Image (tube, rainbow, N blue to C red):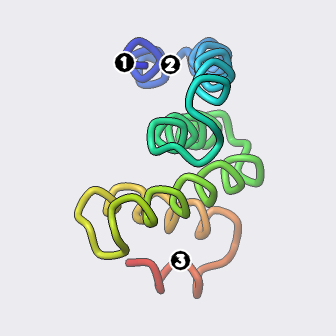
Amino acid sequence: VLLCEWLRVGGDAKQSYKLLMKILTVQQTEYGEDHHMVAKTKYKIAKTLMSLGSYKEAFDYIDKALTVLTAFYGKDHIALDDIKISKSHLLYDLGQEKNALILI
C-alpha cells in the first residue's frame, strides 16, 4: 500500500490505482466489506481517483471509507480528520461548497 501512495504522489496515479484495486480485492476476500483495513484502502483509492480527476467515483469510495472508519474509531476520533478534510475538498470540487464546509 505504501508503494501505491509513493506512485500516486510521484505522478503515476494510474499504476497506483491498478495496484490498489488488486489489494482491495484481496482484502475484501480476506476481511469482508466492513473491515477497517478495507476502508483504509478505499480511502487511498479515493485519493488516487481525485488525482486522476475522477471526482464522482472518488466520492463513492471516500464516503464508504468514512462510514466504516467512523463506526470503527468513533465519530470524533483524530484518525478521521484527514479523511474528512479530503472529503471536504472532494465535495468542493464537485460543486457542493455548502456540504464541504460542514465537514471542516
- Residue of label 1: 2
86 is higher (above) or lower (below) than 21: below
Q: Identify the secondary structure beneath mark 3.
A: helix
The image shows residue 55 at horizontal and vertical percentages of: 70, 51
Residue most extreme to the left: 78
Residue at point 31%, 63% (across, down): 81
Residue at point 40%, 58% (across, down): 72
- Residue of label 3: 100
Q: Identify the secondary structure beneath mark 2.
A: loop
55 vs 1, left or right, is: right
Q: Which circle's residue, 2 or 1, is located before the other in the chain?
A: 1
Query: Are the residues at dot 2 and dot 3 in contact (C-beta closer than 8 Å)?
Result: no
Q: Which residue type does callout 1 highlight?
A: Leu
- Marks 2 and 1 sit apart, C-alpha to C-alpha, by 14 Å
Q: Which circle's residue, 2 or 3, is located before the other in the chain?
A: 2
Give me the disc on residue 103.
none
The image shows residue 52 at horizontal and vertical percentages of: 66, 34
Q: Residues within 10 Å of mark 1 (few under 14, many from 20)?
A: few
96 vs 41, left or right, is: right
